[in-house]
Amino acid sequence: MALKTQAPRRLASRTEESPLYGVAMLKIAMELKKPQPRALDDILRGVLARMNISEDAFRTFLDQNGGLLRAIAQRKQY
């Protein structure tokens, strides 16, 4: 009996990227909801620096999973 091992491995690699990415997304979204928020890139850089997360790696994650953050930013016209 052949077992499919690729799908779980692929799923594991996505979750291993960083468990903090979801927390960073939440922090960025909350910053965007403030009455006088800064520019999206400034918020993103600041949150990632405070959390010690690689900006390049996080931007790759956003390319794959950033639909919600993009929707919030577009609604706020960033």
Image (tube, rainbow, N blue to C red):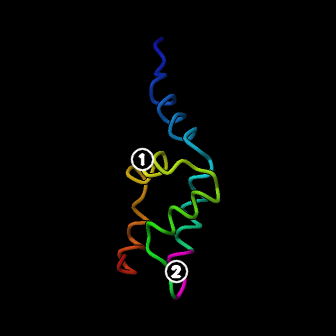
Percent x, y of residue 62: 43, 54
- Residue 78's quadrant in the figure? bottom left
User: Disc 1 to disc 2, how far (Cα)?
Assistant: 23 Å
Relative to 51, does residue 78 appear above or below in the rendering?
below
Is residue 33 within the magenta segment? yes
Residue placed under numbered mark 1 in the picture: 60
Percent x, y of residue 33: 52, 80
> Which of disc 2 and disc 1 is earlier in sequence?
2
Is residue 65 within the magenta segment? no
- Residue 67's quadrant in the figure? bottom left
- The prevailing secondary structure element of the residues shown in magenta is loop
**Image point 44% across, 70% down: which residue?**
40
Q: Tell me the crowding category of disc 2: few under 14, some 14 to 19, or many 20 or more residues within 10 angstroms, Cα based.
A: few
Specify whether 46 is left or right of 57. Answer: right
Specify whether 48 is left or right of 39. Answer: right
Q: Callout 2: helix, strand or loop?
A: loop
Question: Do callouts 1 and 2 mark residues in contact (Cβ within 8 Å)?
Answer: no
Specify whether 67 is left or right of 58. Answer: left
Foreground of the two, 65 or 6: 65
Query: Could you say which disc has been placed on residue 33 in the image?
Result: 2
Figure disc tally: 2
Outermost residue to the bottom: 35
Q: Tell me the crowding category of disc 1: few under 14, some 14 to 19, or many 20 or more residues within 10 angstroms, Cα based.
A: few
**Magenta residue span:** 31-35
Amino acid identity at mark 2: Lys
Amino acid identity at mark 1: Thr
